[in-house]
C-alpha cells in the first residue's frame, strides 16, 4: 500500500489576542501564525483495514505520550477516512521533535501532516476546501498547519478564518522550553478569571510585509495569567528582554510566549544579540531547554515513499 512522509512544522504566534467569549464557551481569537523549521517527522501508510499509530520522542517513554487513539493525529486519520471513504485503514509513525505542551502546535502539526499525507496518497483526493473544513474541526491551530499555501497567515474567529500572507525573510528563532507543559484548556480558564485588558489595534495589509512592523504588533494575551501560575515564564521573558552586551531589544526583535505556553521564543532583528551574556544566561536557565531553529520560508511538501 502507498506511503508518504512529511515534516510537520511547528508554529509560533507572532501575536495572539483573545477576543469575545461565545455563549458556547469558546473564545474568539486573532493571531498571526508563523511556521518554523523545527518539526516532527510523520510517516503515513494506507492499509486495507488495520489502524495503528506509534509515537516516539527521545528521552520520553512511549507510555508518557498517551494512548494512540487519543492522539490528535489518530483523530485526523479517522476523520479523513470518514470524509473520503478511503483508505480502509492507516499506519502512522511520528518521531516527536517538537516539545509536548509547549504552545508550538506539535499535536496540531501532526494532525495536519496526516491529513495532507493521506490526501496525497488518495487516488481521488478530496478538494482543499473539504480538507480545510475537516482540519478546522480538530482545533484552532490545525487549519493553519494543514494548509500548504504559505508559512505565514493571519487567523481569527476560532482560527477557522484565515488569510495567508507572503513569507517573510528567514530569521533565527530561538526556543526556550521550561521542563513542564501547559494545558490549553487550563490556560483559557485562567485567562477568563483575569482577562487581559483590551488593546485597540488597526491592522493594514502593509503591516505584515516586514519584521519591524510585525514586531510593533507583538503581544500575547496569555502571558500575564499564565505567568501568575508559572512565574518561571515571566522570569524567563525578563531575562531575555534585559539589556546585555551587544543586545538591542525594541528594534525589531520579538520575544514572547508562544500560544498558551510554556515555551518562549526569540526572533532577533538582523544580526542583533538577545538578552544578557551567555555567562549570565546560564545562571537563569536551570531546567530550560534551548532549541535553535529558524522561521520557515515555505510549507514543507509531502514526499511519497513507495
Image (tube, rainbow, N blue to C red):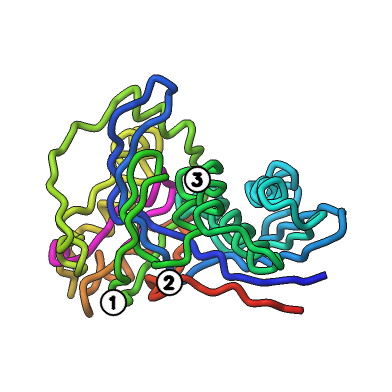
Relative placement, left or right, of 266 versus 176 is: left
CA separation, marks 1 and 2? 17 Å
Q: For the point 66% across and 72% down, which residue is it?
A: 5
Quarter holding residue 88: bottom right
Disc on the earlier residue, 3 or 2: 3
Q: Earlier in the sequence, mark 1 or mark 3?
A: 3
User: From what the image shows, is residue 222 above or below residue 267?
Assistant: above
Q: Which residue is mark 1?
A: 169
Q: Which mark is residue 5?
A: none
Instruction: Please state which of residues 185 and 87 is positioned toward the viewer in this rendering.
Output: 87
Look at the picture and state if 238 lies above or below 17.
below
Give the mark nearest the N terminus, 1 or 2. Answer: 1
Give the CA distance from mark 3 to mark 2.
30 Å
Q: Kindly identify which numbered label has been placed on residue 136.
A: 3
Distance between the alpha carbons at the discs numbered 1 and 3: 28 Å
- Label 2 element class: strand
Q: What residue does disc 2 label?
A: 292
Residue drawn at 79 percent across, 60 percent down: 91
User: In the image, 20: left or right of 74?
Assistant: left
Amino acid at each position: 500500500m502507498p506511503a508518504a512522509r512529511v515534516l510537520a512544522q511547528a508554529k509560533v504566534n507572532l501575536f495572539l489576542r483573545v477576543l469575545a467569549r461565545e455563549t458556547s464557551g469558546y473564545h474568539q481569537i486573532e493571531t498571526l501564525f508563523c511556521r518554523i523549521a523545527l518539526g516532527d517527522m510523520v510517516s503515513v501508510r494506507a492499509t486495507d483495514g488495520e489502524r495503528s499509530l506509534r509515537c516516539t520522542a527521545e528521552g520520553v517513554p512511549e507510555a508518557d505520550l498517551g494512548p494512540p487513539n487519543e492522539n490528535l493525529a489518530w483523530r485526523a486519520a479517522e476523520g479523513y477516512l470518514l470524509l473520503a471513504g478511503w483508505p480502509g485503514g492507516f499506519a502512522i509513525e511520528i518521531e516527536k521533535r517538537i516539545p509536548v505542551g509547549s504552545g508550538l502546535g506539535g499535536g496540531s502539526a501532526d494532525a495536519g501532516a496526516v491529513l495532507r499525507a493521506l490526501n496525497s496518497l488518495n487516488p481521488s483526493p478530496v478538494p482543499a476546501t473539504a480538507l480545510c473544513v475537516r482540519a478546522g474541526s480538530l482545533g484552532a491551530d490545525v487549519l493553519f498547519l494543514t494548509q500548504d499555501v504559505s508559512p505565514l497567515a493571519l487567523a481569527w474567529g476560532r482560527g477557522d478564518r484565515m488569510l495567508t500572507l507572503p513569507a517573510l525573510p528567514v530569521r533565527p528563532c530561538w526556543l526556550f522550553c521550561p521542563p513542564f507543559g501547559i494545558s490549553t484548556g487550563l490556560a483559557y480558564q485562567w485567562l477568563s478569571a483575569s482577562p487581559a485588558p483590551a488593546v485597540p489595534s488597526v491592522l493594514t495589509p502593509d503591516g505584515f510585509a516586514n519584521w519591524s512592523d510585525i514586531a510593533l504588533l507583538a503581544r500575547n494575551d496569555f502571558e500575564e495569567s499564565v505567568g501568575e501560575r508559572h512565574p518561571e515564564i515571566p522570569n524567563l521573558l525578563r531575562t531575555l528582554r534585559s539589556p546585555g552586551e551587544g543586545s538591542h531589544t525594541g528594534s525589531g526583535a520579538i520575544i514572547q510566549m508562544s500560544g498558551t505556553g510554556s515555551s518562549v521564543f526569540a526572533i532577533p532583528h538582523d544580526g542583533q544579540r538577545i538578552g544578557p551574556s551567555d555567562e549570565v544566561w546560564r545562571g537563569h536557565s536551570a531546567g530550560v531547554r534551548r532549541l535553535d531553529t529558524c522561521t520557515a520560508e515555505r510549507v514543507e511538501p509531502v514526499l511519497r515513499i513507495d
